[in-house]
Amino acid sequence: MGFLAMDIFSNFIYAFSEAFRPENLLFCFLGVLIGTLVGVLPGLGPVATISILLPTTFTIKPEQSLIMLAGIYYGAQYGGSTTSILLNLPGEAASVVTCLDGYQMARQGRAGPALGISAFGSWIAGTASVVITMLIAPPLANFALQFGPPEYFSLMFLGLTVLTYLASGSMIRALMMACVGIFLGTIGTDIISGLERFTYGSYTLMDGLGLVPVIMGLFGISEVLVNIEQTMKKEIYKTSLSHLLPSLQDWKDSIKAIFRGTFLGFFLGILPGGGAIIGSFAAYAMEKRISKHPEKFGKGAIEGVAAPESANNSAAQGAFIPLLCLGIPSNVVMAILLGALLIQGIKPGPLLMKNHPDLFWGVIGSMYIGNLLLLALNLPLIGLWVQVLKVPYPILFPIILIVCVIGCYSLNYSLVEVAIMNIFGVVGYFMKKLEYEGAPLILAFVLSPMLENALRQSLIMSHGSFSIFFTRPISLIFIVVAIFLLVSPLIPGLQKRPKAAELG
Amino acid sequence: MRRDQISSLVWLIFAIFIGLESLRLPIGAWRDPGPGFLPLATGLLLGVLSIISYLQSRQGKLPAAKGSWYSKERWPKLMMVMVSLFLYILLWPVLGFFVSTMALLFFLFRIVEPQRWTVTIGGSILISLAFYGLFEVWLKTQLPKGLWGF
């Protein structure tokens, strides 16, 4: 027990000594600043922004690049609440439920406490998550050292299954997108045989289809195209923003909701396929269910703001655990971060903590500091963010498009990659219109090379027998859960999947 | 035919393409799968899923995609934005980054929701200059130069 406490204490010290290095602090600040800005701007989500800014991070050290990208991710969760409360327009998907009670509070002249509790709730959640991460990451990484190719294959299979299971539309279509992602991941030179696959003589494709053009196209360009089609109406609710600090009664009403939201969000964040969106919906649903006054929900209940806002923050951080400890991304943002690390030559996984302690603990420590910075950024600067909201989309979108093009081009100075990005932009647009989700495609695309390697190595190990996935206990558990999720829509009584949109 | 059915058929054609192209690669054996193994398996699975999706949508089991497929007044604008993006990169080697960006911005500011002329002209020049200064001058990104050397 004493050793454990010592370990945790020394990890704390190490994490903060890394995070407080001036250059790390700078990138953490940049990350949360950009993240908040993005969270505030409707029509530009964290996925799109991380994709757009991905190329710029390749020129800095991996540790700083991850710190900045992580800052964008959890910063956007903070910023998203501002637009939900003031405009009834979620800046990004994880803030959708905040609209329900947040906007009602704004209409009742209580926008200040709503913004205040969401900032404080997010900060408490972020802080608690960092502490839990420090407690569970080392044992989890140790456990994952026992994983061989069959376990990794089963775990990735489970991750893809959960993501398709939780897809908001048809599960069949989500599975189709996962297949397309796996196929796209096989394009390029096969590392085992050295044979070229689906390259058709293109030098650009020999190294595989680039992650950046695909992601920027599917999430950046396509989002702009969809937004152009819709006329965006913005009416900011004019309300007093002078009293941002929640009253004692507000605290009493929401403190328990904040803690419940934090824990639920964190554990949903860890689960493969989970993440901030599911976390916020589930926390709202739970609060409504256990509340003594469920009728107040949707009419300006402060718990209805506090719980999802805490949950989406802790989920955003919990999602780092499978990425950093197992090397498995649990959602699409983590898949992009995994791609970013791989491009930088770093393989996340159980050995990351041992081989790159500066990166692992630096990122964890920076999250804590990032949360403090966010609190400082959000409360005093809310007036500024409201001004940012007034930038008209017809001025904003051409700038976003050009940033995408330059970002994609500057990576390898290849116009072919820019063309690939544009093509995926158009594909992504049609996918959105036809309700095919991009998330399973990207997750499968990023995992595809690892999935294929693990599958081929497992089959070589077992001399061609698939029983290897069922005879090893850890692998068996993953496979059984995955199969259960796959067949559950066919079992009577279990047909209703917990779709994100229905949880509220 | 509903648009869900059409999209399922498009994916089915894509699956057949993947399957046929994978067969040109060594598939290997169970004990040592070759480079064509996973693409072939993926193509087959995608094909089966597309057929299920087609049948489900034909029987009305799949909820129809929500929202309008296209709006008459917005669709041409959207097409113009898509085409202008492709033209933009084709123009880079000829006109160079600076002039092509200015041209694209000018076009986009006028096309979707026409801005005032001062915003259109001033905005395209200023934003192009800002991008040029940020990426070419400060970050030393080697952006393509046109026939006139910038």
Image: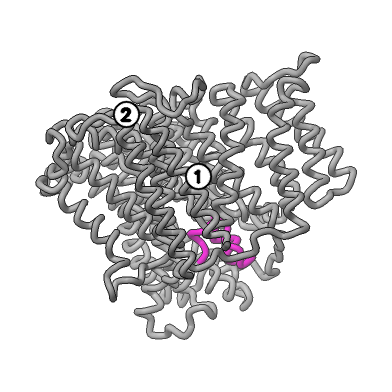
Residue A91 in which image quadrant? bottom right
Q: Main secondary structure of the magenta part?
A: helix
Q: Can residue B102 be seen in this view?
A: yes
Provide the residue designation for mark 2: B35
Q: Is residue B2 left or right of residue A288?
A: right
Q: Mark 1 lies on which chain?
A: A
> Is B1 located above or below residue A222 in the figure?
below
Colour convention: one colour
Secondary-structure class at tag 1: helix
Q: Can residue A311 be seen in this view?
A: no
Amino acid under label 2?
Pro
Q: Distance between the residues labelled 1 and 2?
A: 38 Å
User: Which x, y percent locates residue A189?
Assistant: 39, 23
Residue A21 in which image quadrant? top left
Q: Which of B124 and A474 is in front in this view?
A: A474
Q: Which chain carries label 2?
A: B
Residue A61 lies within the magenta run: no
Q: Give the range drawn in magenta.
A: A79-96
Q: Which mark is residue A272?
A: none
Q: Nearer the viewer, residue A45 or A297?
A: A45
> Is A213 located above or below residue A425 in the figure?
above
Disc 1 versus disc 2: nearer the observer: 2
Amino acid under label 1?
Ile
Provide the residue designation for mark 1: A72
Residue A80 lies within the magenta run: yes
